[in-house]
Amino acid sequence: MALVFFLIVTVNQLVYIAVFQISNFFAILNRIASILQLENYSERHAALPPAAGSGEEEHKTERGEVGGYIKIQNASYNWGFRLSDKLQGQQHNQVNLLGAAEENVLSEMNFELQPGDLMIVVGTVGSGKSSLLHALMHETNQTGGTHVVRGSLAYVEQEPFIFSASIRDNVCFGLEYDAARFEVAVRMS
């Protein structure tokens, strides 16, 4: 009798654990499927048309030469996810479960930067400094206004890090070795 009782308890526990794990598996599978159905980053931002009248093609700096610039007009951003067109409206609630923000974290921003300009952003923790940087790199959802970035951007974290490699590999950062550039970089640091 003791052996039968032991088998009944053990089998009941295993069935309970199996059902619990299977339900967790399907919940995780649904979340992963929702994430995989989101629009790709490159597709989302490649589709953004240049703003009408932004002068993106022939923008000249104050010095008269054509160069890079950043121009933000009445732009608003949030941290939400954007579904591809075929999924629009079908799974809105599932995406919100993943933490999509409905309200803007940055609203009606206006500024223009040209090469050589210096802009200092200060504020308390949670005031939107990092969100501004992510918005400039198209890593947030633009919900309004115009956003034009001509040229290239570089984002350098405050926290330094090094690769587990040689000093030369850390300075070159994956680029082909150029002795002159390497020497300049080492002298400047």
Image (cartoon, grey):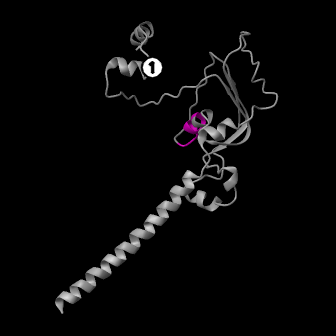
Task: Name the residue: 75% across, 21% down.
Answer: 57
Is 169 positioned to the left or the right of 104 in the image? Answer: left
| Residue name at image x 38 percent, y 29 percent | 161
Question: Is 99 included in the stretch rendered in magenta?
Answer: no
Q: Position of residue 168 (x, y in %)?
A: 35, 17
Residue 107: tell me if it is visible.
no
Q: Dividing the picture into quarters, in which one does residue 69 lie?
A: top right
Residue 19 seen in the current view = yes
Query: Which image quarter holds the N terminus?
Result: bottom left
Residue 107 in picture, x, y percent from top left: 69, 42
Question: Farthest residue toward the top?
Answer: 180
Asked whether 76 or 23 is in front, the reply is 23
Q: Main secondary structure of the magenta part?
A: helix
Residue 8 position within the rendered picture, expressed as x and y whole percent measured from the top left:
27, 86
Q: Amino acid at mark 1?
A: Leu
Rendered-image quadrant of the C terminus = top left
Residue 179 left/right relative to 136? left
Relative to 5, is 98 above or below? above
Residue placed most toward the observer, 136 or 5: 5
Q: For the view shown, which residue lies furthest in the bottom direction?
A: 1
Quadrant of the image occupied by residue 182:
top left
Looking at the rendered structure, the secondary structure element under dot 1 is loop
Q: Which residues are magenta?
A: 126-133
x and y percentages locating residue 128 in the rendered image: 58, 40
Residue on which the image places disc 1: 175
Could you tell me which residue is drawn at 64 percent across and 22 percent down? 151
